[in-house]
Amino acid sequence: MSTCEARGAAALKSLRKARGWSLADAARALVETARQLGQPLASSATSVQRSVARWESTKRPILPSERYQLLLAHLYARGRDGQIALGSGSDFAHLLDALAHLGAAETQLRELSALLVRTATDGGTGLLALLGPTTQLSMAAALADPTRVDDALLAGMRAAVGDVNAQVGSLPFARLQLLLAPVIESCQRLLAGGVPEPLRPELRTVAAQAYTLAGRLAFETRDDRASRALYAAATDAAGQLGAPWRRAVVHMSHALVTLYSVPGIEAARELVDAAVRDARTGDSVRVRARAHALQAEIAARSGAERHAQTALSLAWYDLDRGVDGDPAPKSFTADHLRGFEGLCELYVGDAAVAHDVFASSAEALDTPRERVQRAIVSTDQALACIRLDAPERAADLLHGCANSAAGTGGRVPALRLRQARKQLRPWRREGFVADLDDHLIDVLGS
């Protein structure tokens, strides 16, 4: 038995004992959970008890099957007070760690987490689900007296923002707004209160991240006024941190939503140019690469081929540098940049090259978090197909994009879908276009 497996078995045992359960109690709880979920176990409670004992074995523990992982997730998603708690420090978070030590795949654990977050928000409740129990108590105390803010509370808030961000692509945007709302309100109230000065930079960092994500979510749910206000707050918070790359991140997110919510391209261009200026003086080469990539897209959409190619070259140069200690090392990758490269080829280059670049990029964007981006890239690939006189292939791609747009409620994929559908007008009498229209009406209502 490896040390990792021993740690997982011990963690499962610790979780059980913290509830005051014997092996038999845990077995009965799992049987009852299965019954409540409408998936009763064929095994007897005695047989389930033996399974529990094998998971916790000090000699040769085994990983619970996927079905038992699901039951354990539902069982430990509710704290001892009966409330759903999924955030850092919760029993559910400890369960995921235990299963990981026992060998559960990262994709399976991600799916479990997404499922439980979805369950928590099914009835419009569970708004504090991503705030761990300790964070909830600390936040309540800090809102009553801001001088009680501490590092642990800020870490919990940061983790909650990260958890919401991780669910993009797995849950509808409207649900993500609900989950983020407590953090947004807390940031607003704490920034206006008497938080100790040494902790204010970290609070502003959390606020900038939370407001930026909230601005994007508000845009996706078609609340443009709220989106603009949140981006303004994010820009202000990031601007007080003395780290220009953080404000560049806000500008880039704002530029993307502006591109689709404001007529013309100039407003988005101004934000991208501001992002480039901040990124060039900032510490993150990855953020700088993304800023140059966005600059290339704006130039390509304007028909400025030389400017687009220059910006793309700068983006590749930034990525190839690979500076150690980048404060945002995973914020932008070569796979993301290939999507921008495809856009430039689509607007000012070769449609065949664009198609191949989009296909490669979409295949690489395979995590749930990248589901929205993959739908956007696939829609652009369909546009390339249309320009290559392959409309039926384009329609096939758009069917998949429609499902993704419907699943997330994403505004940009839906807008790109409508743009691509307009390009199919010359084939409107063809059966494959009629099938696509039926599908769009079924899932998007348009």
Image: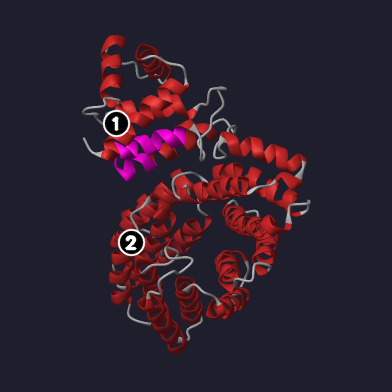
Secondary structure of the residue carrying numbered label 1: helix
94 in the magenta segment = yes
Instruction: Tell me where the magenta segment starts and ends, as one range.
Output: 92-110
319 in the magenta segment = no
Q: Position of residue 209 (x, y in %)?
A: 59, 58
- The residue at 47%/60% (across/down) is 418
Secondary structure of the residue carrying numbered label 2: helix
Q: Quadrant of the N terminus?
A: top left
Q: Position of residue 204 (x, y in %)?
A: 66, 59
Quarter of the image for residue 23 reads: top left
Q: Position of residue 107 (x, y in %)?
A: 33, 44
Residue 47 visible? The answer is yes
Q: Dot 1, crowdedness within 10 Å: few (<14), some or many (≥20)?
A: few
Q: Closer to the N terminus: mark 1 or mark 2? A: 1
Mark 1 and mark 2: Cα distance apart in space: 29 Å
Q: Which residue is mark 2?
A: 362
Amino acid type at mark 1: Glu
Residue 66 is marked as: 1
